């Protein structure tokens, strides 16, 4: 089946510097990536700066037809992958394939198509499990997206376990999807939300977080990589401290899973969520990773078919996880396509993708900060601090909306302006909105150059009115 | 997770605009528009900015009131219907071809917008759905023309606001309410007119019209004899439904027949005995209007066939009435106001199945 390639562990084929991930959380690569697929790969384990080899971004561009178009008379430069990623053709083909050749409802039927669909669907689940190194595919619950996954934990685990006076620790930089569900649930349960502010590096203050932990803390819900600040939190460390006081940890990995190796066993997180559409997969599917014992203890979230064992008129009994949390017909084709996306990413190799993005992200940061009056949010990149490959920024005297509009209209550059679903963070930073350019492994150095040129032009245009 | 779902970019696409348009009807809410035939290399952009080329898929059903010929540019509100200042602005933009020059023009307008006093930057004056903050204020001048003031922290949005302020200020309410967002097409700014909460331009216009309406209603309230008026707008013939910006429950809008003063020839002879509703109507009108003459005639049987009646009304199908009222309460009121007065009194009935009224409303002197 197209797009469903079986991966063989091939650690030996990894070039040594493909594992050079500076960040402490990922010093060990436990996942496989067969580099032999790309003939150029073996000669270019290093990144774009080597002019003899073709950079990763250039190599993969042919897989993304959507990038080859003009908008408003200019070549499209897509710098909004943090909002949603583009999909390679193999993913689209996998989706099409499903509907064209074996679409059938899963888990219920006996006939051939149904069995095949079920197999592929469950195989996709296994792929997700393997991708994040979960110990069992039963620990993967398919949801509509990461937002739904967080709501699942909030309404299922939260309502059961949070009592009046219990504390939930968040950061001020969380995405709304990791704030609002906790607000809703704490209203119902009487739990209290506590927020970790930023330190002078514009990163959530982990020391303060540690201080805030107490026996009252029941949950710590934090992002892995911030979609605004591009900062990365030391999850392993946070989990250790949280577990010491008996608190659980939920990791919002939406901006990390697509870009780097994420190993849930290593992190030892209790819950982890991510969305398919940010990692080259289709929209409409995401997942929750939950430790087996935790999922076992949780009551259903949504009720319906699939999640039941026996149904009577006055009561029902429920299925085991993960089915317990997957009511109704799932997004079957989408799950399978997510599996194809995982295969695609794995073929390239997450360490390689991460390394490429660290370089490109640094390049973006440098070029952006070389422009006058540009203020980039989040930590400065350094040897010890690796930023995600995105920059949220503001230009003095220029509204981000104007900036994004002009970039789009006059230069075909797609960035995002607004609060990026992080209003509390923007309020904390003292701004209404910011502009954000975000990269993915299909972006190139030329994309960054085009963006910076366009930005300079935009700034000078608006400055001409002053 | 969709980030920045709230971004309201008052973003514009500036093109040299050709007059051939494919557009839907001028009614609110404005429907998706094809601005020009798209080349194969262009794809519609579905981003959350104001500017989108919205391609109408073949499956889209056009609103019934739209003209049947799709290529007719008559579907766009003719420029002559616009307030004079707005026409000037449209002409100006049409004469400027180059996109950047259009931008400059727009921003220039914005720069010369009279500043809005901070005390007016209130929640009620804020345009919804914008991340760039926009405020609009409206008040009457001494001739009951609406005067607008506006501000924004984004240059482009400010420019758009300035266009609207300049174009609509100093005009009477009905003229303002007649304006549809179509004129934005004529500007050659690629303006999406789809009603989404991110569409700052559309929302700005809507807010300005809502405020104009509110001023009108409030003005009438102050000058009328203390009857509290709903903000449901009585449509004038040429803007049938077009100005229903504030009207939330269009479904329950009664159809009514305005009897313009002519004697109702069907009154009198075949009087159907009044049921519960009829009695209630009579009582209410007697109590509130102190009429010299009052006739309430149940003519529901005449309408018993049509769909809206079937099964909709309580009270044994009492849905249509002829009313003839002669009362001093109508003194000094226009016809429209008289009918509105009566409708307001019969609000309850209208909500519960009364479908239509045919009204003759006179003062004793007019009989």
Image (tube, coloured by chain):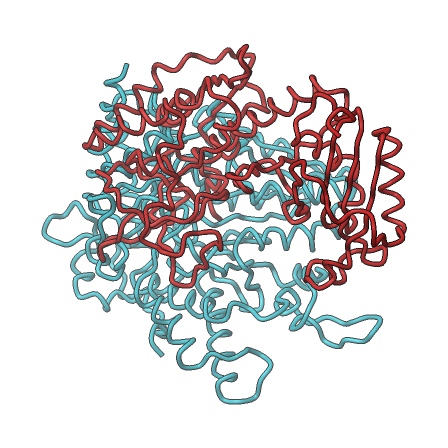
Chain colours: A cyan, B red
Q: How many marks?
A: 0
State whether residue B217 is above or below residue B283. above
Left or right, residue A8 beside residue A248: left
Q: Position of residue B111 (x, y in %)?
A: 34, 16
Image quadrant assignment for residue A288: bottom right
What residue is shown at x 47% (from left), y 83% (from top)? A116
Q: Position of residue A202 (x, y in %)?
A: 45, 28
Left or right, residue B54 beside residue A37: right
Closer-to-camera residue (B280/A419): B280
**Picture quarter with the C terminus of chain A:** top left
Q: Position of residue B268 (x, y in %)?
A: 82, 47
Left or right, residue A139 beside residue A234: right
Image quadrant assignment for residue B364: top right
Closer-to-camera residue (A357/B80): B80
What residue is shown at x 47% (from left), y 67% (from top)? A335
Q: Is residue A409 visible?
A: yes
Closer-to-camera residue (A350/B149): B149
Q: Is residue A205 visible?
A: no
Q: Position of residue A243 (x, y in %)?
A: 63, 46
Image quadrant assignment for residue B330: top right
What residue is shown at x 26% (from left), y 26% (from top)? B92
């Amino acid at each position: 089946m197209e797009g469903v390639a079986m991966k063989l562990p091939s650690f030996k084929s990894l070039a040594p510097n493909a594992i050079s991930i500076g960040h402490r959380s990922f010093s060990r690569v436990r996942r496989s990536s067969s580099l032999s697929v790309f003939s150029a790969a073996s000669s270019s384990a290093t990144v774009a700066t080597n002019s003899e080899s073709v950079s990763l971004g250039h190599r993969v561009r042919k897989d993304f037809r959507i990038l080859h178009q003009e908008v408003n008379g200019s070549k499209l430069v897509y710098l909004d992958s943090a909002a949603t990623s583009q999909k390679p053709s193999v993913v689209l083909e996998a989706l099409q394939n499903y509907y064209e050749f074996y679409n059938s409802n899963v888990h219920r039927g006996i006939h051939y198509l149904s069995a095949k669909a079920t197999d592929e669907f469950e195989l996709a689940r296994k792929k997700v499990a393997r991708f994040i190194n979960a110990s069992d595919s039963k620990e993967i619950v398919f949801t509509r997206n990461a937002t739904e996954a967080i709501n699942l934990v909030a309404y299922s685990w939260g309502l059961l376990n949070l009592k009046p006076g219990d504390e939930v620790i968040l950061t001020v930089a969380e995405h709304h999807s990791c704030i609002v569900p906790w607000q809703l649930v704490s209203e119902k349960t009487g739990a209290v939300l506590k927020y970790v502010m930023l330190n002078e590096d514009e990163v959530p203050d982990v020391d303060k977080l540690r201080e805030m932990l107490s026996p009252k803390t029941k949950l710590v819900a934090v992002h892995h990589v911030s979609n605004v600040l591009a900062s990365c939190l030391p999850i392993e460390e946070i989990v250790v401290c949280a577990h010491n006081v008996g608190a659980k940890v939920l990791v919002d990995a939406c901006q990390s899973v697509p870009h780097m190796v994420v190993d849930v066993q290593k992190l030892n997180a209790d819950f982890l969520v991510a969305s398919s559409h940010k990692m080259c997969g289709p929209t409409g599917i995401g997942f929750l990773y939950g430790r087996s014992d935790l999922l076992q203890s949780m009551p259903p979230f949504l009720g319906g078919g699939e999640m039941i064992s026996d149904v009577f008129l006055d009561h029902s009994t429920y299925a085991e996880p993960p089915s317990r949390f997957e009511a109704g017909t799932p997004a079957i084709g989408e799950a399978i396509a997510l599996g194809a996306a995982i295969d695609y990413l794995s073929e390239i190799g997450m360490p390689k993708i991460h390394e490429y993005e660290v370089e490109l992200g640094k390049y973006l940061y440098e070029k952006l900060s070389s422009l006058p009056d540009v203020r980039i949010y989040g930590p400065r990149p350094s040897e010890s601090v690796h930023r995600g490959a995105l920059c949220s920024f503001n230009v003095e005297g220029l509204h981000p909306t104007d900036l994004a509009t002009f970039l789009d209209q006059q230069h075909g550059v797609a960035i995002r302006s607004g609060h990026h679903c992080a209003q509390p963070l923007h309020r904390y930073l003292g701004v209404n909105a910011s502009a954000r350019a975000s990269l993915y492994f299909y972006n190139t150095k030329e994309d960054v150059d085009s963006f910076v040129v366009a930005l300079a032009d935009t700034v000078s245009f608006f400055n001409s009115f002053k | 997770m969709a980030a920045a779902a709230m971004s309201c970019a008052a973003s514009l696409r500036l093109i040299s605009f050709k007059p051939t348009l494919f557009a839907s009807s001028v009614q609110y809410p404005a429907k998706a528009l094809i601005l020009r035939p798209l080349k194969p290399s262009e794809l519609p952009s579905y981003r959350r900015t104001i500017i989108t080329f919205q391609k109408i898929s073949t499956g889209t059903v056009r609103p019934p009131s739209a003209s049947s010929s799709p290529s007719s540019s008559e579907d766009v509100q003719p420029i002559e219907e616009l307030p004079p200042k707005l026409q000037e602005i449209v002409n100006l933009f049409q004469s400027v071809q180059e996109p950047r020059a259009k931008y400059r023009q727009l921003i220039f307008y914005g720069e010369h917008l009279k500043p809005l006093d901070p005390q007016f930057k209130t929640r009620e004056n804020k345009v919804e759905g914008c991340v760039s903050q926009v405020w609009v204020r409206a008040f009457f001048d001494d001739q009951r023309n609406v005067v607008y003031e506006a501000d924004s922290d984004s240059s482009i949005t400010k420019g758009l606001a300035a266009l609207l302020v300049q174009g609509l200020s100093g005009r009477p309410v009905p003229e303002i309410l007649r304006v549809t967002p179509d004129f934005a097409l004529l500007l050659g700014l690629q303006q999406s007119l789809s009603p989404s909460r991110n569409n700052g331009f559309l929302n700005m216009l809507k807010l300005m019209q809502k405020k104009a309406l509110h001023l009108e209603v409030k003005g009438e309230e102050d000058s009328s004899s203390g009857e509290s008026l709903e903000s449901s707008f009585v449509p004038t013939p040429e803007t049938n439904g077009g100005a229903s910006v504030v009207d939330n429950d269009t479904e329950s809008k009664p159809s009514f027949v305005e009897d313009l003063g002519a004697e109702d020839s069907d009154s009198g002879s075949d009087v159907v005995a009044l049921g519960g509703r009829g009695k209630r109507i009579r009582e209410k009108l007697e109590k509130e209007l102190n009429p010299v003459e009052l006739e309430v005639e149940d003519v529901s049987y005449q309408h018993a066939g049509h769909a809206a009646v079937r099964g909709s009304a309580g009270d044994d199908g009492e849905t249509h009435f002829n009313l003839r009222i002669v009362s001093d309460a109508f003194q000094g009121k226009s016809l429209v106001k008289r009918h509105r007065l009566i409708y307001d009194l019969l609000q309850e009935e209208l909500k519960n199945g009364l479908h239509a009224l045919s009204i003759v409303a006179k003062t004793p002197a007019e009989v």
